[in-house]
Amino acid sequence: DAGITQSPRHKVTETGTPVTLRCHQTENHRYMYWYRQDPGHGLRLIHYSYGVKDTDKGEVSDGYSVSRSKTEDFLLTLESATSSQTSVYFCAISGQAGGLTNEQFFGPGTRLTVL
Amino acid sequence: QKEVEQDPGPLSVPEGAIVSLNCTYSNSAFQYFMWYRQYSRKGPELLMYTYSSGNKEDGRFTAQVDKSSKYISLFIRDSQPSDSATYLCAMSLNSGGYQKVTFGIGTKLQVIP
């Protein structure tokens, strides 16, 4: 998985609780992304980061926040989880020196269930 | 209308068959075209990448892009049971200095031994 880990890999939580997912890379890629994957929708971008402390919204960012305090870590936080946020979350990276920003490498995913 | 359309399948073929997977798109600004393979409960992995109209071959896989028709294809020759997976097309364009990638919903392929 191109030196990308995600934690936790599975999580079950209750509506209204905060949840933080972590993505860690060892590849020194500049860009990091959070996607969610749902049946019938495919992969949808939640937020992305183009550098330390530099983040921007994707197409489905409502209810999510992110932080990137180090090159290697990108955190996704659900401030107050809802059942509609039950999904599989993927972290991706791109933009290694000399590489292409559109060539994304994905982590193994986190399966989140909100009851 | 979605920017990228992909038939979700499932597509079931016998081992050894030639498989054709397709996507259409509406945004002529897309510059780069990719195919990802995703095994069950795994992350997508980049399979093929191209940026021009025409064909690109890699082993049993051929990616074809027709920009005039806004249509891309992935062909798999001599398909194997290990090719059973979901195949995602993806396309990107320059958006404020980075390449914004849009994915199709994926086509589930099953190769029967």
Image (cartoon, grey):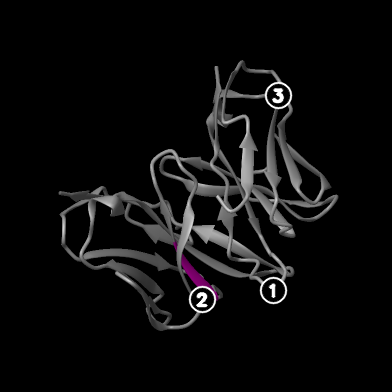
Disc 1 or disc 2, which is closer to the eye?
1
- Can residue B102 be found in the magenta stretch? no
Q: Residue at x 32, y 55 (%)?
A: B7
Taking the image as shown, residue A5 lies to the left or right of residue A18, namely left
- Quarter of the rendering occupied by the N terminus of chain B: bottom left
Q: Give me the chain letter of mark 3.
A: A
Q: Which residue is mark 1?
A: A98
Residue B62 % position (x, y)? 33, 73
- Can residue B33 be found in the magenta stretch? yes
Q: Amino acid under label 3?
A: Ser
Closer to the chain start, of discs 3 and 1, is 3
Magenta range is B31-35
Residue B73 % position (x, y)? 34, 70
Looking at the rendering, which quadrant does residue A94 occupy? bottom right
Q: Give me the chain letter of mark 2.
A: B
Q: Which residue is mark 2?
A: B28
Q: Which residue is mark 3?
A: A80
Characterize the local packing of mark 2: few (<14), some (14-19) or many (20 or more) Cα atoms within 10 angstroms: few
Name the residue nearer the viewer: B96 or A106.
A106
Residue A23 % position (x, y)? 68, 41
Disc 3 or disc 1, which is closer to the eye?
1
Instruction: Give the spatial CA distance, label 3 vs label 1.
Output: 39 Å
Disc 3 or disc 2, which is closer to the eye?
3
